[in-house]
């Protein structure tokens, strides 16, 4: 076979990025070449996200371009994989540009689906039928093997890797599509996770980020012992080459204190907690089916700050949820001011077909109001972050260097050998400084000389 080139475009969250890394690694293993240009490719895969309508619109616009590309390039194969593939199934397969559709639970089958499509010149689909009730034991075994065999640090930052500790979600927040496309919560065995981290460490990885949609729900029972997230953190801490361990994302409900104690007591565990609140209004939280009140959430934040000194906390919010009044929104602003986050991600509500909110409530907040609330909340957070970041002025911080910074920043690169680099502290603060690209993937000390709401700027401490 002549060597085929594959281009993979990834949308969405870290789970998707991890899936794309594994698929890239598997396809390389089968002899395919990876290209970052769709026009050069014989096969284009789009790993999709269904969390917001906008993400799906971007996929359709991409498919529009690929339809044109196909007219000039006979034999070009287009595959749609991930959450949107699972959600829309055959509807997507009917799209003129699409040849392959594969859900998130079928990533291990992608090399075979490509082979068959090339051979038979016909469309193929593999998704999970009745995902909430499907008997997925075999699929999970296949995914575990796939995960262990292929590299999860492919396409990623030097010496950093993601490790999935669980799949799916059982929380059913009323607005969220994830439980319907990623299926029920399944925790991987601690043994499989540790084997994978050991393998990554042997290949030079220094930081692992444990991934789960609601990672604090991690539960695995084996030989009469039940393992929780705190146990995983402790076990991973014992792996020599691993220096930093992160975990995302936590759900505020049933947040086990043992996780905070592990964060405080295990030096390798980064003091960074991403725990989305979504709203500060009890009425909206109830409609969202989040399972806690604003007060209960703030108590958790207080406890985290007490148990883990210098912890940095980040959150997500949805503004413009159906029926969100000004009073509800102001309750959110109040919560953000009280929580004093390191940073927040703010999203405008976007109805997702099939979710409870979409079935029961009307998307009745005008786009203009959603935009204004989005901007106001970000502005409140920016002020908090600007003020908080000043505490770093004159301090030396340790960062794991990611590589050259993509955007122009305050630090001007002096010459080619001293470009602008980006690194991240254990508390997830982004630091920009000048240095040689050769230190990407290494730890470095940076003296902070300037700060903004989103970034710390400094110079290498030599
Ligand atoms: S916890 Fe809620 S928002 Fe997060 S993935 Fe599960 S259902 Fe979606």
Image (tube, grey):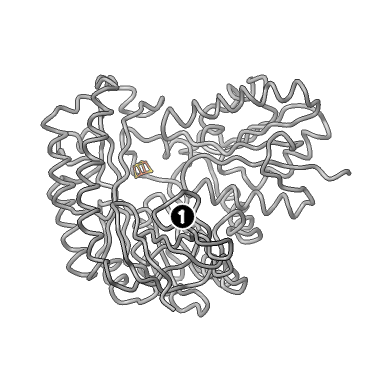
Q: Which residue is drawn at 20% across and 36% down?
A: 286
Q: Residue at x 19, y 34 (%)?
A: 284
Dividing the image into four quarters, tell me where ligand 1 lies: top left
Give residue 416's position: percent from left, percent from top. 58, 61
Q: Which image quarter holds the C terminus?
A: bottom left
How crowded is the residue under tag 1: few (<14 C-alpha within 10 Å), some, or many (20+)? Answer: many
Image side of residue 154 versus residue 327, left or right: right
Q: Residue at x 72, y 49 (%)?
A: 27
Residue identifier under label 1: 166
Residue lying at the far front in this picture: please name it.
414
Q: Which image quarter holds the N terminus?
A: top right
The residue closer to the viewer here, 191 or 371, is 371
Instruction: Specify the quadrant of the image occupied by residue 105.
Output: top right
Give residue 201's position: percent from left, percent from top. 56, 72
Q: Residue at x 39, y 27 (%)?
A: 352
Give residue 97's position: percent from left, percent from top. 67, 23
In the rendered image, the vertical position of residue 186 relative to residue 429, given as above or below: above
The residue closer to the viewer here, 322 or 166, is 322
């Amino acid at each position: 076979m002549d060597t085929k080139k594959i281009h993979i475009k990834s949308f969405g969250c870290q789970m998707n990025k991890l899936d794309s890394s594994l698929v890239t690694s598997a396809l390389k293993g089968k002899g395919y070449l990876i290209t970052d240009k769709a026009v050069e490719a014989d096969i284009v895969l789009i790993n999709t996200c269904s969390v917001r309508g906008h993400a799906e619109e971007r996929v359709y616009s991409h498919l529009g371009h690929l339809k044109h590309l196909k007219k000039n390039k006979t034999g070009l194969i287009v595959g749609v994989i991930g959450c949107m593939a699972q959600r829309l199934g055959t509807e997507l397969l009917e799209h003129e540009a699409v040849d392959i559709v594969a859900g998130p639970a079928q990533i291990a089958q992608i090399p075979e689906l490509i082979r068959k499509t090339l051979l038979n010149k016909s469309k193929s689909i593999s998704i999970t039928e009745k995902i909430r009730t499907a008997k997925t034991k075999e699929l999970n075994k296949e995914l575990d093997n796939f995960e262990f065999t292929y590299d999860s640090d492919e396409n990623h930052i030097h010496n950093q890797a993601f490790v999935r500790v669980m799949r799916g979600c059982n929380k059913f927040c009323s607005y969220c599509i994830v439980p319907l496309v990623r299926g029920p919560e399944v925790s991987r065995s601690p043994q499989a996770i540790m084997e994978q981290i050991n393998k990554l460490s042997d290949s030079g990885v220094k930081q692992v980020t444990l991934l789960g949609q609601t990672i604090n729900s991690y539960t695995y029972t084996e030989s009469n012992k039940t393992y929780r997230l705190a146990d995983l953190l402790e076990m991973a801490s014992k792996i020599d080459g691993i220096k930093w361990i992160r975990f995302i994302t936590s759900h505020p409900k049933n947040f086990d204190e043992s996780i905070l104690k592990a964060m405080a007591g295990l030096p390798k565990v980064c003091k960074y907690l991403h725990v989305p609140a979504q709203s500060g209004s009890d009425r909206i939280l109830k409609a969202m089916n989040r399972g806690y009140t604003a007060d209960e959430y703030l108590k958790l934040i207080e406890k985290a700050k007490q148990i883990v000194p210098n912890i940095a906390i980040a959150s997500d919010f949805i503004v413009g949820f159906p029926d969100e009044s000004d009073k509800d929104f102001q309750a959110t602003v109040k919560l953000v001011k009280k929580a004093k986050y390191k940073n927040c991600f703010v999203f405008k509500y976007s109805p997702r077909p099939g979710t409870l909110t979409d079935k029961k409530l009307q998307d009745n907040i005008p786009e203009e109001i959603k935009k204004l609330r989005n901007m106001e909340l970000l502005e409140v957070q920016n002020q908090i972050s600007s003020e908080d970041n000043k505490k770093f002025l004159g301090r030396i911080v340790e960062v794991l260097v990611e590589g050259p910074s993509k955007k122009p920043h305050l630090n001007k690169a002096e010459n080619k050998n001293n470009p602008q680099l980006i690194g991240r502290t254990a508390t997830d603060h982004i630091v920009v400084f000048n240095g040689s690209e050769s230190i990407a993937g290494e730890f470095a000390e940076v003296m902070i000389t300037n700060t903004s709401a989103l970034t710390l700027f400094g110079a290498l401490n030599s």
